[in-house]
Image (tube, rainbow, N blue to C red):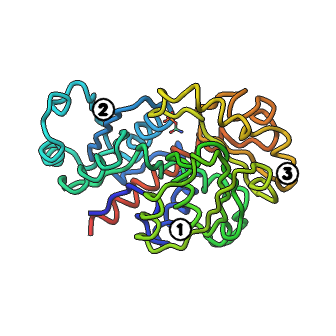
Amino acid sequence: MKHFLKSTDLKDCEVEKVFSLSQQFKKTRGEGGLSVLGNQSWGMIFFKTSTRTRISFRVGIQELGGHPVHINQDEIQLSRGESIEDTARVLSRYLHGLVIRCYEHTLLEQFASHGSIPVVNALSDFLHPCQVYSDAFTLLERWSDGKRFLDALKGRKIAFFGDAASNMANSWVLGGSLFGMEVALAGPGQYAPGPEIEAVLKSSGYAPTYTFHTDPMEAAENADVIYTYVWVSMCKENEASDRLDIMSPYQVNASIMARAKPEALFMHCLPAHPGFEVTQEVMDSRASIVFDQAENRLHTQKAILAMLAETNKH
Ligand code: CP
C-alpha cells in the first residue's frame, strides 16, 4: 500500500506525475467529469485546526468524484481509549483512504501500518509534505517554461527563516533534497534541524542539500525564494513569549528581501502574523505569492490523491 506521509515517499517519476497532474487539474477545473476517486469515500480526521488543508482536501475529494467523510476525533471511540490499531482496521473496512492532521507523526505511521487503505499526512508536528509539494508547484508555474519539472527546480536556492526545527523547515530539508534545491535555513542556534530529520533524509537515500545559518543575511544571499513560517506553531503555544523574542532577528522584511536576488519571490504557507515573522510590506509586495501557494493546495492535493488511487489499484 502506497501512503503519503513524507515528501520522499514518492519516486522522481511520481513527483513529475504529481506536478503534471496538478497543472492539468488547475487548467481544467470546473469542466467536471473527473471520476478518479469514482464513488470512493475518504475519511478526514483533523486533531488540529486548519483552514486551507481541511477545505482544499474536502473540495478536492469531491471534485475527483469521491466523498469526503468528516470524522470528528471527539466523537469516535479513539478519544475514549480505543487503540489506533483497531481504529485503523475498522476504518479500513468502510473507507478507501484517510487524510489525517495530527500532533505525533507516529500516529500517521501507526494508521498506515495497521490499516489497509492509503494514509495522507495533512500535517504532523514533524512534517507537512502536502504544503511543500504545493509550494514547489507554485514555483514551477513561474519557472518551468516547458522544462521537465524537476529540472526547473534543480539548483534554485530557497532561504527559510524562523524555526529551523519546525515541521515546515523539516519538510523543506526533505523537499530540497528531493527537488535538487539548495535550502538555507536561518534561525536561532537552539532551533537548528534535529537528528530526526537527518535520520529520515539518510534512510530516504537522498543527499542533504541544506545548510543552517544563525546570520539571516548570510542565508538570504542570492536566494531565489525567501520563505517564512509562524514562529509559534500549533504544538508550541507554551513557548510563545520566549519564541517571539528569540525569533525577532529572523523577521522577513525589506532588508532580507533586498539581500536575495532582485527577482526573488516571497512565500509563506499561512496563516501569517504580519509584524512578527513577516512585515505587512513584504506580504503585500509584488514578490509575494502566498495566495497562489494557498490556491495550489487544492490542485496538488488532488494530484497526490489521484496518484495514490492509481498506484494502489495495481
Ligand atoms: N498552511 C496550512 O496548512 O494551513 P491550514 O493550517 O489552514 O490548513
> Mark 2 — residue?
70
Nearer the camera: disc 3 or disc 2: 3
- Quadrant showing the C terminus: bottom left
As drawn, is 15 to the left or to the right of 46?
right
The residue closer to the viewer here, 287 or 78, is 78
> Mark 1 — residue?
16
Amino acid carrying label 1: it is Glu
Label 1 to label 3: alpha-carbon separation:
32 Å
Amino acid carrying label 2: it is His
Q: Earlier in the sequence, mark 2 or mark 1?
A: 1
Contact check, label 2 and label 1, Cβ < 8 Å? no
Q: Position of residue 4 (x, y in %)?
A: 38, 56
Q: Earlier in the sequence, mark 1 or mark 3?
A: 1
**Which residue is depicted at the point 24% across and 51% down?**
110
- Image quadrant of residue 42? top left
Label 3 to label 2: alpha-carbon separation:
45 Å
- Quadrant showing the N terminus: bottom left
Give the class, few, some or many, for how many residues have Cα within 10 Å of label 1's Cα (few <14, many ≥20): some
Nearer the camera: disc 1 or disc 3: 3
As drawn, is 312 to the left or to the right of 296?
left
Give the class, few, some or many, for how many residues have Cα within 10 Å of label 3's Cα (few <14, many ≥20): some
Q: Is mark 1 within 8 Å of ligand 1?
A: no
- Under tag 3, what secondary structure? helix
Contact check, label 1 and label 3, Cβ < 8 Å? no
- Under tag 2, what secondary structure? strand
**Which residue is depicted at the point 77% across and 53% down?**
220
